[in-house]
Amino acid sequence: MRTLDIRRHTMRRKPGVHLSQDGIALARLVGENAGPYDLVLTSTIPRAIETAIAMGFEVHQTIDELGHLPGAIANTVGWPSPFAHVAKVVATDIPAAAFAQAQAQLWRQIADQLTDGHRALIITHGLFIELGTAASLPQQDPASWGDAIGYCEGIGLTYDGDRTHGDILRVPPQYRLVNN
């Protein structure tokens, strides 16, 4: 079995590109209970890289596809949106489905780099996780996954041969924030 923890970046001070002090504190809190990881990957966007570092992990690789969502897909799906809504759009919209499948395939390729028993952390962005999860776990009930992913939340995927299992990774309710 190989495991990926795929998490959204933490808060930044908008419109700036760097993390806010609250974002750093949240990433540190999440990082204390995460890992260890054999591989850490992020999007090329600074808030993703900084989140991994604030969590206490060295970034091994940045990947452009983890951080660039076509505007047409974002507009079609809408964000923030509950997982159930995202899955419905993926089932009916060809570009959204293609993007979701591309994320799921990228995640699988990353998992395939790991040997059994090893783990990787991916830091990406809102809507990337919801789309990729819908494509990675098509037989599961997306309504059970709840609302959109908040800061430092995500999905834990376990790959065991051809089977994929997922668990939503949430922060404690008092820290949960989707937008700042």
Image (cartoon, rainbow, N blue to C red):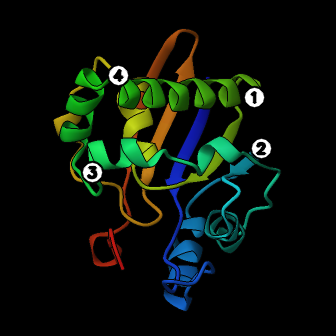
- Depicted 84 relative to depicted 97: above or below: below
Q: Quick one: label 1, few (<14), some, or many (20+) residues within 10 Å? A: some
At x 38% / y 41%, what residue is drawn? 73
Q: Is residue 44 left or right of residue 91?
A: right
Q: Which residue is mark 4?
A: 94
Q: CA distance from mark 4 to mark 2?
A: 35 Å
Please name whichever residue, 22 or 36, is drawn nearer the observer in this view of the structure: 22
Q: Dot 3: what SS?
A: loop
Q: Is residue 94 left or right of residue 4?
A: left
Kindly tell me whether residue 151 is visible in this rendering.
yes
- Depicted 38 relative to depicted 162: above or below: below
- Disc 3 marks a residue whose amino acid type is Gly
Q: Which residue is mark 3?
A: 78
Q: Which residue is mark 1?
A: 114
CB under 8 Å between discs 1 and 2: yes
Q: Which mark is residue 38?
A: 2
Q: CA distance from mark 3 to mark 4?
A: 15 Å
Q: Quick one: label 4, few (<14), some, or many (20+) residues within 10 Å? A: few
Q: Dot 4: what SS?
A: helix
Quarter of the picture containing the C terminus is bottom left
Q: CA distance from mark 4 to mark 1?
A: 31 Å
Tell me which corner region of the image, top left, top right, bottom left or bottom right, holds residue 173: bottom left
Q: Is residue 44 left or right of residue 144?
A: right
